[in-house]
Structure formats: structure tokens, C-alpha cells
Amino acid sequence: MAHEHKLEIFRGLLKFKSNVTKIWGVLIVLSIVTAIEVWLGIVKPESLTENTFIRMKLLNWIFIILTIFKAYYITWDFMHMRDEVKGLRRAVVWTGVFLILYLVFILLTEGDYIFNVYDTGFQSWDF
């Protein structure tokens, strides 16, 4: 009993005729996102490096969001999570997304603290 995989991506926006064409389509989508990340890393537009949101440059936020998108999409399509039951999909995908977001939060908080220590000397948190 063969299980048919869905041959569309982005909720049916792009449909493919075979698994091979779908793999190429997914590869192209991930390559475009990676090319955008590389381009932004080389060019570093001033509007994104001078403006901040929650004490971090907008360019860094874009990198984090695009990286999380790629990790989610790889799990969703290459690990065939879209074909699994809803409970397993949520357990695997959302757990990973929340753990990545938590790790990013911890790294940014600690990194900001270390930066302030090197920038202004000893600094303590007043609880």
C-alpha cells in the first residue's frame, strides 16, 4: 500500500507533476532564500544596519527569520511532515521552532550583556 505524497508547495500555490519536479522546485525556493541572505550579508543596506528593533539591527532580525523559515521548510517538505497526522506535525515542527526561538533569545540576551560588560565595564542586573 503506497502512500502518495502531496505534490504542491505553499498550500497549493505551486503544483508539480512528479516528485522529481517537486524536489527541484523546493531546491529553487531554498536557493532563492539563501541567495537573499548572501546578498544581504554582502551588501548590508544602511537602512537595515542603522535601524534597530529590540536592541538588535534589522538585518540580524531578517537573517534569523529567514533561517527559521528555511529550517521549518526543510522539516516540512524534505522530512515529509506535511503528510503526517496533525499531532505528529505539531509535536515535531513546533517543538523545533520554539526551541530555536528560545535559543535565539538566550543568545541575544547573553550576547547583549557581554557586549555591555566590554563596552561600559562591569554591569550588574538589579532584580
Image (cartoon, helix red, strand yellow):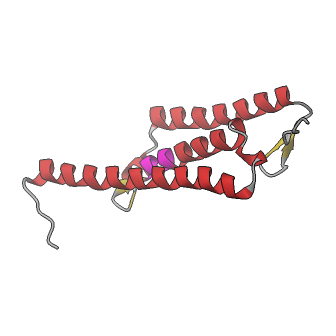
- The quarter in which the C terminus is drawn is bottom left
For the view shown, which residue lies furthest in the bottom direction?
127
Q: Position of residue 56 (x, y in %)?
A: 36, 54
Looking at the picture, does residue 4 appear above or below residue 84? above
Rendered image quadrant of residue 36: top right
Q: Is residue 44 left or right of residue 4?
A: left
Give the number of callouts.
Answer: 0
Q: What residue range appears in magenta?
A: 58-64
Nearer to us in this view, 118 or 126: 126
- The quarter in which the N terminus is drawn is top right
What residue is rendered at 53% in x and 42% in y? Answer: 67
Q: Is residue 107 left or right of residue 36?
A: left
Q: Is residue 7 magenta?
A: no
Q: Is residue 65 left or right of residue 124?
A: right
For the view shown, which residue lies furthest in the front direction?
1
What residue is rendered at 64% in x and 41% in y? Answer: 75
Q: Position of residue 123 (x, y in %)?
A: 10, 59
Rendered image quadrant of residue 73: top right
What residue is rendered at 11% in x and 63% in y? Answer: 124
Q: Position of residue 31 (x, y in %)?
A: 65, 31
Q: Position of residue 10 (x, y in %)?
A: 77, 48
What residue is rendered at 20% in x and 49% in y? Answer: 115
Q: Main secondary structure of the magenta part?
A: helix
Nearer to us in this view, 53 or 13: 13
Nearer to us in this view, 89 or 42: 89
Looking at the picture, does residue 87 appear above or below residue 74? below
For the view shown, which residue lies furthest in the left direction?
122
